[in-house]
Amino acid sequence: MSIEIVRKALEDWFTRRGLRLESELSDRELVLVEGNNRVYVRIANEEFPTESYIIDELSNAMRNRLKYNKAYIAFPLSARGLINGKLFRSHWVGVYLYDLTSNDPDKTVEELIPSIPIQTQQNLSEDLKRRLDDLEREIHNLREDFVKNDAMTLMKEVDELKSRLSKVEHIISELLSRVDKLERAAASVSHAQEERGETAVAGELPDFLSNNPWIEVLRRRGGEDG
């Protein structure tokens, strides 16, 4: 079936009803103006369409559905018994049937299913989009707060660990100093004992430090710091 003949018949029928052709997106896609509405019309020119063909045409029309207030698909008259009205209405798409054999110009095209205007759906879409934008901003802010708070917590923990380490180092330093003094005192006592002829074991510490495991640890730490 010639798409040019079908398109010309449809354009003439639309013009008689006050619709103005705005543009042709392709040889099978028209955009019309009806008052404040922009109407999308897709032309199906398969002479004997099947149910799968009709569904494919609906799927193709849905790609542009949200761009226009109304949307239709024009099928040949032979598709009448195959049109699923519930399916088309649920997608807000109307159906025209055209009959090129009619001798009456007004009966060349029939509006089988009116298209449902989508101003309300568009407004809802805009509301949903705004809400989604708000949610995205909230998630972004929460993520930033989480990262910021997490970083602050880590910094506090690091500062606390540094403070504790500083205190431990200070205590170790004091202990090493005390050990050094004790070793010097022990050496002095040992030297005095030797001078008095008393028996003393070289390097022996006073009784209160003998066999103390911490002495060796502190000595090694002192050697490492040196």
Image (tube, rainbow, N blue to C red):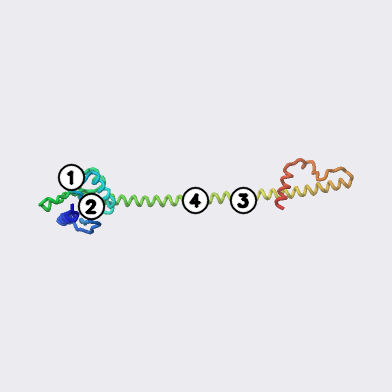
Mark 3 vs 1: CB contact within 8 A: no
- Whichever of labels 2 and 4 marks the residue nearer the N terminus, that label is 2
- Whichever of labels 3 and 1 marks the residue nearer the N terminus, that label is 1
192 is higher (above) or lower (below) than 15: above
198 is higher (above) or lower (below) than 37: above
Q: Which is closer to the viewer, label 3 or label 2?
A: 2
Q: Which is closer to the viewer, label 3 or label 1?
A: 1
Mark 3 vs 4: CB contact within 8 A: no
- Whichever of labels 3 and 2 marks the residue nearer the N terminus, that label is 2
Q: Which is closer to the viewer, label 4 or label 1?
A: 1
Q: Give the SS element for disc 2.
A: strand
Is 77 in front, or is 158? 77
Tell me: 152 left or right of 48: right
**On residue 162, which mark appears?**
3
Q: CA distance from mark 3 to mark 1?
A: 83 Å
Q: Residue at x 22, y 44 (%)?
A: 50
23 is higher (above) or lower (below) than 102: below
Is 166 in front, or is 12? 12
Q: Which residue is mark 2?
A: 42
Tell me: 42 left or right of 127: left
- Whichever of labels 4 and 1 marks the residue nearer the N terminus, that label is 1
Q: Residue at x 18, y 43 (%)?
A: 81
The residue carrying pointer 4 sits among few (fewer than 14), some (14 to 19) or many (20 or more) residues within 10 Å by Cα, namely few
